[in-house]
Image (spheres, rainbow, N blue to C red):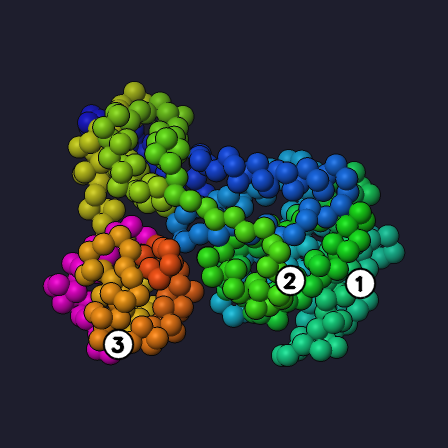
Amino acid sequence: MCNKVSQEDATMRNPYTPGELPRVLAGREDQQHRIRGVLSRVSAYGETGGPPVVFLGPRGVGKTSLLREAQRDADEHGFLTVWVSCHHGAPFLPDLVSRVDHALRAADVVAKGDRRSLRLDEIAVEIGVPTGVKVSARAAPDEGGGAETGARVSALEDLLHGTATRVRERGGSGLLVLVDELHAPSRTDLAVLLNAMQNLAGGREDSPFALVCAGLPSSVSVLTRAATFAERSTFVTLPPLAPEAAAQAVGEPAEQLGVGWTGPALAEVVERAQGFPYLLQVLAHATWQSASPVAGDRLGVADVRAGLPLVEAQLDAMFAARWGAATPLEQHLLTVMAHAGSASVTRAEIAAGMGRSTQSLGMPRERLIDKGIVEPAGHGRLRFTMPGFAEYLRATTATGEASRPST
């Protein structure tokens, strides 16, 4: 256990960042290698990077961190990068176009005297006329496809192609678009993006562009509903971190500040987190905050356990939000799962516990998967996506804090 410290020493910055980018991205070497392979193809040949690469996993497994690391890597290797984070049911193309505009200006790809505004209220784009990107297609956003959607696809295709080739002409590698929360956006906007990329792939030798995305496992069905050919995307599921990688993610940030972890303390954090990067950060952050170490200290098991009340408070707030996001029927399903007491629960067990037919579980099951609260765990089985949620539900439903809902 570390020693008591002065108020000045106690201000040493906490190197752990729950909900933000970690200081050390450990255990994702295979996924990083896959992204670099795509970028190498664009950089070496000046062509598209192939079908969209989509990283899948529950919240807290590190998808956003992986994409941010890819963005940083691409920036260093001459790519113009554009980041878009989607929101439930909302259009994202206006944000995409705005960010393309911002990236071009920040990179000084467009000459200062030739700048004009870029907008997507009607997908009408002109940048850097006469030497920059120019897109003349116009189409108001539509509700159901048709000619208007075709014009929007053409406009976006021209924008992506023009931006990518302009970057290449200036000595850069190309354009990388990163889309986070891919399970969430407007299906119409998603269809426009997918069709534009499909068209660019048809002339791949002249389009130095790549698309890398991340989302919940439900992103697969979201993509294929938007465009059937999206099933040819490269889907990569992010697994929990192996114990060695989890230990690295916790140990290295402290070492950089001259603080160590004892073996037993590190093992306890790793075991409690069960391979979830978010939980690793929560546990390590709370341990550090409770211990207030200085250079030369070593964090021990007692420090980990002293920080647990902070961990429990943070997780309880998150679990309460997940519970509140569920409908009464979904809450009933979650309660039955939690009280089953096993890592995964069969559809038949859930139906019996709810007093309903297995056929009636389809809709609440799918909604809970879409919300990222549960996930499939083999044929006919479900499990919670976040470790600790089952224990939270057992405790709160037992004490009446989260009463078992009626059907």
Mark 1 or 2: the one toward you: 2
Q: Name the kind of residue labelled 2 in the image.
A: Phe
Q: In the displayed structure, would residue 356 be above or below residue 394?
A: below
* Residue drawn at (68%, 37%) of the image: 40
* Residue drawn at (52%, 60%) of the image: 220
Mark 1 or 3: the one toward you: 3
Sooner in the amino-acid sequence: mark 2 or mark 3: 2
Task: Where is residue 65? Give x, y as percent.
Answer: 48, 44
Give the number of the disc on residue 135: 1
Crowd class of label 1 (few under 14; some 14 to 19; many from 20; radius 10 Å)? some
Tell me, yes or no, if residue 3 can be seen here: yes
Foreground of the two, 100 or 301 = 301
Q: Name the kind of residue labelled 3 in the image.
A: Arg
* Range of residues picked out in magenta: 386-407
CB within 8 Å, label 1 to label 3: no
The residue that mark 3 highlights is 356
Task: Where is residue 339? Give x, y as percent.
Answer: 19, 61
* Residue drawn at (44%, 35%) of the image: 27
Sooner in the amino-acid sequence: mark 1 or mark 2: 1
* Residue drawn at (39%, 43%) of the image: 240
Q: In the image, 90: left or right of 24?
A: right
**Cα–Cα span, label 2 and label 3:** 37 Å
Was residue 404 drawn as part of the magenta stretch in this picture?
Answer: yes
Crowd class of label 3 (few under 14; some 14 to 19; many from 20; radius 10 Å)? few
The residue that mark 2 highlights is 229
Q: In the image, 39: left or right of 403?
A: right
Q: Please, what secondary structure does the residue beneath circle 1 have?
A: strand
Q: Quadrant of the C terminus?
A: bottom left
